[in-house]
Amino acid sequence: TVEPVHSSRRLPASAYTFRKAALKWQEVKEPTMGYSIMMPGKPSASEMLNGEMKVRMYYDMANGIVYYASFMRPANAITDNNKDSLFQNMVASSVQNGAEIVNRKTIERYGLPGVEIFYHNKAEDMYMNMQIIGKGRKLYMLMMGAQKREALESSTLDFFNSFKLIAE
């Protein structure tokens, strides 16, 4: 919403200032999915893969950043023998259409093996940072995306580190 400013003085446009409202991060608890995470607003809920994947997403319009957390129970349990191929398939399905992987590393959270990928989706001109972690019949995917790479640099760790496993 644009609010007009009425004044008896004339000022150049460069003299006007705008302050972004500070975001009020809130905990998003998903006990049925076994996790909680902090997001800068109330996320919308949706489902993918015929309801098998539960998604929570929030778009911060002021900063142009999308926050995404999802959970699913894979058909086959994630084991030490199949985790690498399963994570690679998840990455391949997310990183499509000429996206360029900038960085990839193996991670572990709460004893769950995983992978972290930073990539540039050239088709949508979006930079994405994604973590996939899982074990047994639990698979979590966390993502942040923005058109400006710098936008992700300051808040990605806070978002990823706010992820916690909770009792189902």
Image: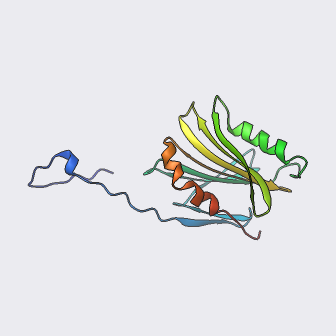
71 vs 153, nearest the viewer: 153
Residue 56, image x, y percentages: 63, 55
Q: Residue furthest right?
A: 81
Residue 109, image x, y percentages: 74, 60
Q: Residue furthest left?
A: 8
Q: Is residue 53 left or right of residue 10?
A: right
Q: Residue at x 53, y 49 (%)?
A: 152
> Vertical placement of 143 versus 91: above or below?
below
Q: Is residue 72 left or right of residue 29?
A: right
Q: Quadrant of the C terminus?
A: bottom right
106 vs 146, nearest the viewer: 106
Coloration of the structure image: rainbow
Q: Residue at x 73, y 41 (%)?
A: 91
Q: Quadrant of residue 36?
A: bottom right
Residue 138, image x, y percentages: 80, 57
Residue 125, image x, y percentages: 53, 34
Q: Is residue 101 left or right of residue 125?
A: right
Q: Residue at x 70, y 64 (%)?
A: 35
Q: Residue furthest bottom?
A: 167
Q: Residue at x 83, y 56 (%)?
A: 135
